[in-house]
Amino acid sequence: MAGISNRLRIAVVGERASGKSYLLYDLIHAFGLLGYVPEELPLSYPYSSFGTYFYDTFNSETGGMRGTERYACRPDNHYGAWLSRSTLGRRLEVDFLNIPGEMFDLSHNRMSMFFNLRQIIERRSKGLFILSVWRNPAGHEERLIVHSGVDLMNGVSVRPSSQQRFGNYLNWNHLRCFLHEGRYKEVSRKPVSGRYLLQHLTTLQTDSVLLTIEDCWENLTSLQNMSLEDYQAGQVLFYFYPLVYCQQATDLIICDNLMQENNVGNLAESVAEFMKESSHRRPHAYLAFRGADGLLSKLAPATVKNASEQKKAENAASRNSLYEWMMQEVMRQMKDSDGAAETSLPDGWPLHIRQSLGDGVGQAFWHLLNASMADGWLARLRSKFTNRTNVYELTQLPGWRLPPHVYFTATPIDASCRIYKNDPDDITRFYHDDEGMVRSFTTEVNSGRSGHLCLGAYQLLTDILLQNGIRSEGMDNRGEHLLYIQSKL
């Protein structure tokens, strides 16, 4: 379609059960609430669709919303869409990647090893890497990176199991089987540079890229003292794809589950160190706490019940009003806990929140927020002549406060403020016991009896769009808290 094109690339990072899958579920729905409609994707689209995300997440072999366990990351692990709004004549090209937090483990030397390898690849001119394009009878193409010594037309062919493919990258024999069984034929080949490989990594057949890097290791690192065995042991190659993606992302969300004992303070600092070491673009940073359903039920049940009975949150103004009320309660009680006063926040939550956020620019999410800010003289000049927020100045203000871009999100809640839980007999189903009447979340939303509230996720998506220069109706009726949280940095 004609119009302005905008690209959003969203990295969602967190430990298992931190709420990444739930958040993405709500973010996808929030696009619809903001009026964005999916366009039909072309055959050449490299990623899985939003519809595939729902299928993969709720209909996996293990049942339910699968946690993000260790997996071999490829373009089909991406989920994306082309979204349009007829009133704006604008297409949003969106994709996101679900990334396990263990990737940023600083106990290994993984980050510095990754940057060394990336630099070597980026400096490589044409000749070592060959782009080999294969096409099947249906017209679908696979874009492989090979070297002159590999022959995919002839040789041993081995079919990998789906479990083997999920947890590990494949070898040349596996790829040969995939191409033969899919009736692919090579239609072109040309030499490409290392810079091309890195810029297009998320559209290339990942297994072939990693195999070629390993096969050409001695040639590639001839001037460096780099051991392939060390890079394999440190899982630098295993995490190479998501690490490159984090450098290409426009936005990065850290997920934290308030119902778990561990907080994300250390993870946020590790991601901050990764950002500061990188010379590439720094994505906007956000923190999404999972557990707003627990907050609503603990803070003021009568107020929530009244909201359910008196009005539905079905537009931007009412959604933001409810969220503003909830955050005012959270802020008030967090300030009370400064003096060790009793609060109605669940046990352990005030400490958990504080440890995830940190106390200044050198700690936890404050540190990540500071690291995500653009560096250099041009950024400093822009900040001087605009109203952009200075992170250090915010940390020096008296009293306790949340950093900007921090949100409290929830498991499914409908527009009537009903909180849904996982059905223990069918983990793929969310239900709400409404005084003896059991409601299914999917049925309520799809039948039109109630809308999807997307509590926190709706406001987070509004912020993501805003930070990327896109205004939306989600900015309607923003109170003092949202205006502060969605500050430009």
Image (spheres, rainbow, N blue to C red):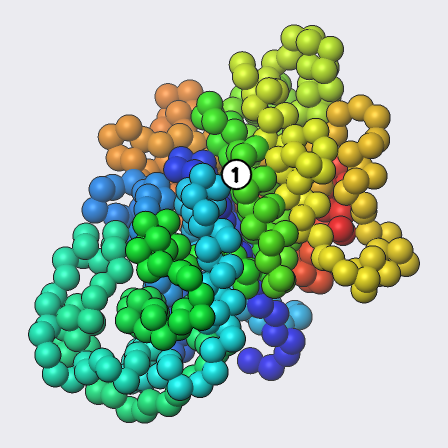
Going by the numbered disc 1, the residue's amino acid type is Leu
Between 64 and 357, the residue placed more toward the observer is 357
Left or right: where 306 falls relative to 162 = right
Left or right: where 41 falls relative to 398 = left
Q: Secondary structure at mark 1?
A: helix
Left or right: where 441 falls relative to 385 = left
- Using the image, determine if residue 215 lies above or below residue 102: below
Between 8 and 14, the residue placed more toward the observer is 14
Residue pointed to by mark 1: 267
Q: Residue 307 location in percent, x, y?
A: 62, 29
In which quarter of the view is residue 280 placed? bottom right
Between 155 and 148, the residue placed more toward the observer is 148
Q: Residue 312 location in percent, x, y?
A: 60, 37
In which quarter of the view is residue 353 placed? top right
Left or right: where 323 falls relative to 206 = right
Q: Kindly identify the residue that appears in the image at 89 percent across and 55 percent down.
A: 384
**Quadrant for the N terminus in the image:** bottom right
Q: Kindly identify the residue that appears in the image at 27 percent across and 48 percent down.
A: 59
- Using the image, determine if residue 135 lies above or below residue 198: below
